[in-house]
């Protein structure tokens, strides 16, 4: 049987730890061509910080060069905002801005810079899809998760609107929530959580690929 | 014409001069573009993203500062980035007009060039003191990383502000292969793509490594455009064939699209896939695929203007140039635009052009030329009758 990920050209931000790393590995196992981006990525990864406006186009350039085109962009790079978590009233504006820059503006800018490549895929009859990794903190009001939750809520809504606008052009935009996982980000947020109660990133990655497959198959 | 001096891709007051097949002129607002095309037409754009192809550095043997502008490559393959054709300037940057830029130090085969994090060897001089072939050290990945970090978009003195990549990438920019932006595509945004869809106008793309537009040196400029690789998707070929079958027009967004499509059709039928556009289009070129072109406003003498001569007679182009001047159209990459429909008589004047790939076909057509010329003569008379009517109209606001 032909795997729908075989030969798929995929770019993932936040691809060196947690869910992003698990997605890179799962996609590579299934025959996808994967480019990953992270602040401290080593070759063949692409070093870049999506929260910085001036790095977006150099990152997009290198994604295009690494893959020769793009079918799937996964915006996974995330920032918790202030660590340890604290009430919104105690959150520094700068920490809030960092969360917005990484979780909202970064995905917006990178998607915009790569929309031409995704449109080209769609016109050639290939899949063209953006997946924004979100969280149940985008839906439920958890005390202490203000900067993260608000930025992920905005990302979810941005995904809905963009999907509405781009669907006629053959491009889909999804927001997917992987659930609570045993990742460095979760450990930073809730250091006392029992890892055995948390989802393994590899399992979450499998679920996300299943959701993607429903759209592109 | 005055140059547009700000890097705005879609100024609200951008103008569009429409020249129809009979040589009649109409002034329109460029934001009306979708309404000026007809249902059943197909707009074809170049979706190349633009490379940061200007590299400041040092010529190691002399120790002198240089600027290298990458200008050509033999393919679009992303791992084929070791060797480039390039133009070398002496010290300085885009703020000095290219024609006033100092020459580079004397260049020799084997010279080493240090361009920020990139290192290159001069492979050979291409019979001009500033035109070289170079080879970068390192893996394709190293080279892309170096370009992304150190390169700047090529730009010219009429735009003093330094350009960023986002200034020169069109809204449909995909594979990074152009040396200068395919700037006719600056008109595109997603709202326009929506408007085209709603009016039943098709949209398709090809990828063409748009080359350098000016070198500041008359002898080098006369060699432009260099050979330019392109990729024509099968889906675009299908859309073009469908458009022609159903009587629609194929409208090329820019000179690069025209060059690629006409090259891909030069052996008869339009072929999908990779190609290298080597021909030079001009007054004597037969256009097999493209029915109209949307382009920037170009001054007579440039290679872009030469290409427009394939669409319209010199008389019509001359009148267009006067209208552009009189109505304050802006020129250069961020300037206003023209839409020129292929003249009713265009493409009948098949003559051999030494740089035209079509020359074999042209010789075959030679026997028929006598008759063609007489037909063309009749059309010319007809054309003048048409031109006696009011020839310049302004679209209702």
Image (spheres, rainbow, N blue to C red):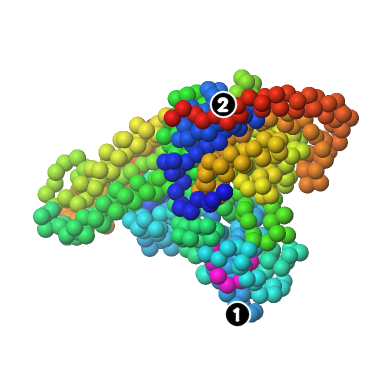
Q: Nearer the viewer, residue B15 or A81?
A: B15
**Subunit that carries the residue with mark 2:** B
Which element type, helix, strand or loop, lies under badge 2?
A: loop
Real-space Cα separation, disc 1 to disc 2, in angstroms: 55 Å
Q: Is residue B93 above or below residue B256?
A: below
**Are the residues flagged by discs 1 and 2 from a single subunit?**
yes
Which element type, helix, strand or loop, lies under badge 1?
A: loop
Image check: A74 left or right of A65? left
Instruction: Give residue B264's mark.
Output: none
Image check: B121 left or right of B374? left
Residue B222 pos. (x, y %): 72, 55
Quarter of the figure with residue B134:
bottom right
Q: Is residue A64 visible?
A: no
Mark 1 is surrounded, within 10 Å at the Cα level, by few (under 14), some (14 to 19) or many (20 or more) other residues, namely few
**Subunit that carries the residue with mark 1:** B
Q: Which residue is mark 1?
A: B63
Give the residue at x 21% y 58%: A95
Q: Is residue A12 above or below residue A1?
A: below
Give the residue at x 44% y 41%: B13
Q: Is residue B37 above or below residue A32?
A: above
Q: Is residue B91 magenta?
A: yes
Q: Nearer the viewer, residue B73 or B67?
A: B67
Q: Which residues are magenta?
A: B88-94
Residue B66 pos. (x, y %): 59, 71
Q: Nearer the viewer, residue A211 or A48?
A: A48
First in residue order: circle 1 vs circle 2: 2
Q: Is residue B390 visible?
A: yes
Q: Which residue is mark 2?
A: B41
Quarter of the figure with residue B260:
top right
Residue furthest right in the image: B367
């Amino acid at each position: 049987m032909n795997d729908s990920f075989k030969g798929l050209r995929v770019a993932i931000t936040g691809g060196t730890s947690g869910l992003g790393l698990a997605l890179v590995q799962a996609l590579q196992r299934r025959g996808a061509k994967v480019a990953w981006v992270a602040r401290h990525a080593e070759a063949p990864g692409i070093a870049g910080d999506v929260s910085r406006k001036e790095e977006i186009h150099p990152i997009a350039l290198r994604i295009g060069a690494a893959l020769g085109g793009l079918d799937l962009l996964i915006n996974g790079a995330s920032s918790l905002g202030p660590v340890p978590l604290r009430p919104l009233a105690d959150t520094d504006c700068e920490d809030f801005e960092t969360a917005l820059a990484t979780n909202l503006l970064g995905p917006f800018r990178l998607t915009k810079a790569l929309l031409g490549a995704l449109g080209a895929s769609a016109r050639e009859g290939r899949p063209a899809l953006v997946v924004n990794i979100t969280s149940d903190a985008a839906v439920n009001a958890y005390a202490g998760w203000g900067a993260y939750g608000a930025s992920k809520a905005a990302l979810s809504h941005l995904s809905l609107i963009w999907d509405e606008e781009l669907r006629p052009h053959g491009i889909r935009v999804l927001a997917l929530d992987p659930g609570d996982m045993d990742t460095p980000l979760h450990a930073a947020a809730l250091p006392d959580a029992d890892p055995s109660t948390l989802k393994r990133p590899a399992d979450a990655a499998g679920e996300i690929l299943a959701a993607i497959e429903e759209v592109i198959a | 014409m005055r140059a547009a001096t700000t890097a705005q891709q879609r100024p609200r007051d951008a103008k569009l001069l429409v020249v129809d097949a009979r040589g009649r002129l109409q002034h329109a607002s460029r934001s009306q573009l979708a309404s000026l095309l007809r249902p059943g037409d197909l707009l074809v754009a170049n979706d190349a993203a633009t490379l940061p192809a200007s590299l400041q550095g040092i010529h190691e043997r002399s120790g002198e500062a240089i600027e290298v502008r990458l200008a050509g490559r033999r393919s679009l393959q992303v791992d084929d980035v070791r060797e480039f054709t390039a133009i070398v300037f002496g010290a300085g940057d885009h703020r000095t007009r290219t024609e006033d830029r100092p020459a580079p130090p004397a260049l020799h085969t084997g010279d080493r060039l240090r361009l920020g994090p990139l290192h290159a060897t001069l492979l050979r001089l291409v019979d001009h003191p500033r035109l070289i072939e170079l080879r970068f050290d390192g893996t394709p990945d190293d080279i892309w990383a170096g370009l992304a970090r150190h390169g700047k978009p090529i730009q010219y003195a009429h735009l003093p502000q330094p350009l960023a990549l986002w200034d020169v990438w069109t809204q449909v920019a995909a594979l990074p292969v152009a040396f200068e932006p395919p700037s006719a595509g600056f008109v595109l945004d997603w709202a326009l793509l929506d408007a085209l869809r709603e009016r039943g106008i098709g949209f398709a793309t090809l990828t063409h490594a748009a080359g350098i537009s000016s070198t500041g040196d008359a002898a080098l400029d006369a060699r432009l455009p260099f050979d330019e690789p392109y990729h024509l998707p099968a889906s675009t070929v299908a859309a073009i064939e469908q458009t022609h079958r159903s009587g629609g027009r194929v409208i090329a967004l820019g000179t690069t699209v025209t060059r690629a499509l006409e090259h891909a059709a030069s052996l008869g039928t339009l072929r999908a896939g990779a190609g290298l556009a080597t021909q030079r289009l001009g007054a004597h070129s037969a256009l097999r695929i493209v029915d109209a072109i949307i382009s920037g406003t170009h001054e007579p003498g440039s290679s872009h203007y030469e290409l427009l001569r394939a669409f319209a007679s010199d008389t019509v182009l001359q009148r267009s140039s006067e209208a552009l001047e009189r109505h304050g159209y802006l020129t250069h990459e961020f300037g206003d635009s023209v839409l020129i429909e292929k003249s009713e008589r265009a493409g009948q004047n098949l003559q051999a052009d030494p740089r035209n790939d079509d020359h074999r076909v042209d010789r075959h057509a030679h026997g028929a030329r006598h008759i063609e010329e007489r037909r063309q003569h009749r059309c010319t008379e007809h054309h003048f009758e048409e031109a006696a009517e009011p020839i310049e109209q302004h679209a209702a606001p």
